[in-house]
Amino acid sequence: MERRLLICMVVMFLGLLSAALAFGAEFKRIKLSEIDCFASGKCTYPRTPAFALGLTAFLVLMIAHVIINAAAGCNCRDKLCSLPIAVCAIFSWLMSACASVYLIGGSVANDRHTMDVLYYEVVEPLLFAKGAIVGLVSVIAGVVYYLTISSIKHMNQMVTPVNADNHGNIAMAQPQVPAQMAQP
């Protein structure tokens, strides 16, 4: 129980940290008003910490998913894995992939700091925020998957098979007959 609690706490902390970093990147992203355009048609983009924040949010989210998937193990072909459990795991992976696209896409788009010819494009508003929310959903789905699969494993370890000690009532050796007491 302590191991499960520790894993869940670490993964949720990493998920919240990833979301906080992504929201920080959202606030620090390049805005259209910050782009300086000159008469020659060239524009300069300021340097912002949004690139580093978005990339760090992505890395922290991936670490959280590696931890949760390593702790849960691969159970998709196991008898323990029912359809709802598999759906929860796959949903977690898909949401993680979507969050990765949002975070990496926003980070790469914010890394533009050179002079370009008539390039006015900036990162879509709320792109990092979408990555943060989808990342949190993926971490929560991963924790639900982990808790479900680990509780099923725990319950199966506690159950002992019936007649395990006497091999299903089949005699395996010489009969054990109690010795008769000799009468004097």
Image: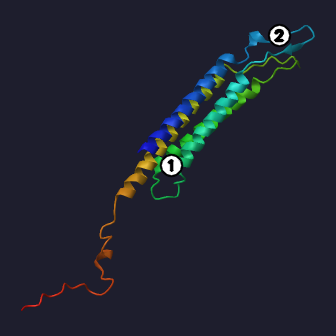
Residue at 45% from the left image edge and 52% from the top image edge: 82
Give how far across and how far down residue 124 sits, in percent.
69, 21
Q: In which quarter of the view is residue 147 placed?
A: top left
Give the camera-side residue of 134 and 3: 3
- Residue shown at 39%/57% (left/top)? 157
Quarter placement of the N terminus = top left
Q: Secondary structure at mark 2?
A: strand
Instruction: Quickly name the residue at label 2.
Output: 36
Residue beneath label 1, please? 86
State the residue lying farthest toward the right.
Answer: 40
Where residue 77 appears, as percent x and y from the top left, is 52, 58
Would you say 158 lies left or right of 39 here? left
Question: What element does badge 1 sit on?
Answer: helix
Q: Is 37 rendered above or below residue 66?
A: above
Q: Mark 1 to mark 2: distance in Å? A: 50 Å
| Above or below: residue 141 compared with residue 176 | above
Q: Is residue 177 left or right of residue 70?
A: left
Task: Report crowding for label 2: few under 14, some 14 to 19, many 20 or more residues within 10 A (C-alpha).
Answer: few
Kind of residue at badge 1: Ala
Classify mark 1: residues with Cα within 10 Å, few (<14), some (14-19) or many (20+): some
State the residue lying farthest toward the left.
184
Q: Are marks 1 and 2 in contact (CB under 8 Å)?
A: no
Report the amino acid beneath label 2. Asp
Q: Nearer the viewer, residue 123 or 181?
A: 181
Q: Which mark is residue 38?
A: none
Picture coordinates of residue 184, whole percent (x, y): 6, 92
Q: Nearer the viewer, residue 52 or 125?
A: 52
Q: Position of residue 33 (x, y in %)?
A: 75, 9
Residue shown at 45%/55% (left/top)?
A: 80
Whether residue 177 is situated above or below residue 46 in the rendered picture? below
